[in-house]
Image (cartoon, rainbow, N blue to C red):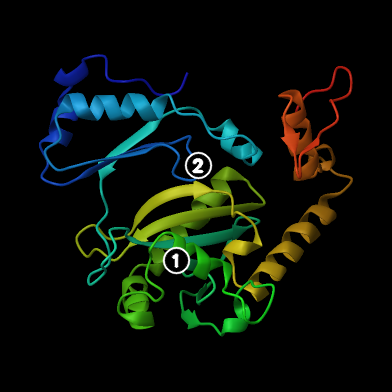
Amino acid sequence: EGAQLPPAGVEDPALQALCSCAFPLVIKASHGANSNAVQVLPSGAAPAAVLEAAALVLASEVEELEAWPIYEVPKGFVAERCYPPLPGSQHPAPLELSVFCIWQDVIGGVFFPWPHRFWVDASGLVWELPREECLQKKAKDACLCEKARARQNLPLEPPGGVGALREALDKHWGHIARISGLVAKLACCEELRVDWFLGDHALGPRLNEVTYMGGPRMMPRSAGSAFLRAVLEGWAARSGGDCEGALVSRSMWMERRVASRGKKCGKGRRTARPPEGGREP
């Protein structure tokens, strides 16, 4: 089931070639979520260390209550060169662009970890956004993404400002949008997020992750409301057709899933058991 470690072990030629490269490596689970199975190895790591890291991520499990598509991915792992950070950045994380697709069309994207500060439109233009686009309960409160940056010790503003973001994106948006759109069409999903690493001239843009959007909190306020309308109206237009049986809310799926495991949902409320003979959607 899924990927397996090389039968030749440390003698595997591809593994030895990977370890001979003079750069740090990252080993990550293709079936992971929220960075739950990522191992970073220094330059010159021994083949045995790479195999050990691969075994760890292969054995990983996604935490309970994730979205259902995550559990459909066969177990596997990716071993590749660590993508370097944006020039001038004091943080080791690379610049990341999340591209959003709705009904297999690219609608725009945001830069992590500033999803409410900038918006990339469908043509690749980078727009600076007013504070009103942040998600906050009260005007004096910090935005959700500001709190996340503070927790992770990430910079409040991108190194080099919006100019650095535009420079990193300008030459590559056509390629990024084309590949993201092809991935969305291949997946046949109503919504999809395609994450890219940017900023290194030698490596160019690299596809990092394909996942679900994560909801409107990943987007500026105005884009989030438009996203919800587009997805709901699309499903409503399909009502009565071949997709009728798939029109099941995520909350219903989640409650049935945790109920089958005897867990609690929400504020300590225990879910009802599934109906007799029922199964998870």
As displayed, is residue 223 above or below residue 218?
below
Where is residue 197 shown, x and y percent of the image?
A: 35, 58
Q: In this view, does 145 lie to the left or right of 206?
A: right
* Few, some or many residues within 10 Å of mark 1 (<14, 14–19, 20+): few
Residue 87, image x, y percentages:
23, 70
User: Which residue is painted at 31% across and 75% down in the image?
Assistant: 159
| Residue at image point 41% right, 59% down | 152
Amino acid residing under circle 1? Ala
* The quarter of the displayed image where residue 38 is located: top left
Helix, strand or loop for disc 1: helix
Q: Horizontal and vertical percent for residue 258?
A: 72, 31
Asked if residue 242 lies left or right of residue 29, the reply is right
Instruction: Compare residues 65 and 197 and report the one nearer the observer.
Output: 65
Q: Mark 1 points at which residue?
A: 150
Which residue position is annotated with label 2?
Answer: 33
Q: Which of 95 and 103 is in front in this view?
A: 95
Which is nearer the eye, 85 or 223? 85
Sequence-wise, the earlier of marks 1 and 2 is 2
Residue drawn where x is 19% and y is 60% of the image:
202
Question: In the rendered image, which quarter contains the C terminus?
Answer: top right
Q: What residue type is labelled 2?
A: Ala
Q: Which residue is drawn at 45% across and 65% down?
A: 149
Estimate how packed mark 2 is, as few (under 14), some (14 to 19) or many (20 or more) residues with alpha carbons within 10 Å: some
